[in-house]
Amino acid sequence: MNEEDRIVRRNIHVPLTCEKCGKANPEYKGVGEYKCAECGYTMYDDFGLVRNYLEAHAGATQSEVSRETGVAMDTIRQFLKEDRLEIVAGSNVMMTCEICNAPIRSGRYCPACALAVEKRIQAEKAAEHKKALQGFGKGNQGESGAIRFRR
Ligand SMILES: [Zn+2]
Ligand SMILES: [Zn+2]
């Protein structure tokens, strides 16, 4: 297991002992899967459970995944926000855009809002730049300069 995975996983349920034979520290095999070195039993952490469920049940909703896997909704949402999980094509809505509530498959915003957020950031940058420029001019000089610049 690499360090980055360990850090990401600190808040989620991870098998610490084999669920079958009780031997400590099952070996991490990747994408949420663990294997007991003693008896070969395979276990999953929260991420592995959710991932498996979604692979087997395309179209599952967030609440269904939570109910069937026992993984908290917040944890599932966190996986989606981190883009570690993407709901397969054709599935029911599991995420909504933070701005307009449009259905999205991963991330925080729908494409339209993501673009709007990007534009707003650009506009704020441009406004700051304009303010800085006006600071150098005297009175209306800065204003006419700005108008000429816009054309
Ligand atoms: Zn075991
Ligand atoms: Zn949106």
Image (tube, rainbow, N blue to C red):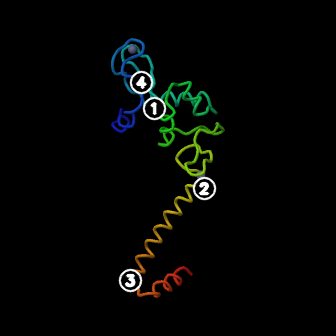
Q: Please tell me which residue lies in front, 17 or 75.
A: 75
Pick the quarter of the image with the C terminus.
bottom right
Mark 2 residue's CB less than 8 Å from ligand 2: yes
Height in image: 29 above or below 5? above
Q: Which mark is residue 31?
A: 1
Asked if disc 1 and disc 3 are in contact, CB closer than 8 Å, the reply is: no
Query: Which residue corresponds to mark 4?
Result: 34
The residues bearing labels 1 and 2 have C-alpha atoms spaced at a distance of 31 Å
Asked if disc 3 and disc 4 are in contact, CB closer than 8 Å, the reply is: no
The picture places residue 114, in percent across and down from the top left corner, at 55, 55
The answer to which of marks 4 and 2 sits earlier in the sequence is 4
Q: Residues within 10 Å of mark 2 (few under 14, many from 20)?
A: few
Q: Residues within 10 Å of mark 1 (few under 14, many from 20)?
A: some
Which numbered disc, 2 or 3, marks the residue closer to the eye? 3
Q: Residues within 10 Å of mark 3 (few under 14, many from 20)?
A: few
What SS does tag 3 mark? loop
At a point 35% along the width and 34% down the height, the residue shown is: 6
Which numbered disc, 1 or 3, marks the residue closer to the eye? 3
Query: For the residue marked with disc 1, what is the amino acid?
Result: Val
Query: For the residue marked with disc 2, what is the amino acid?
Result: Ala
Query: Which residue corresponds to mark 3?
Result: 136
Pick the quarter of the image with the N terminus.
top left
Q: Please tell me which residue lies in front, 74 or 55.
A: 74
The residues bearing labels 2 and 3 have C-alpha atoms spaced at a distance of 37 Å
The answer to which of marks 2 and 3 sits earlier in the sequence is 2
The residues bearing labels 1 and 4 have C-alpha atoms spaced at a distance of 9 Å
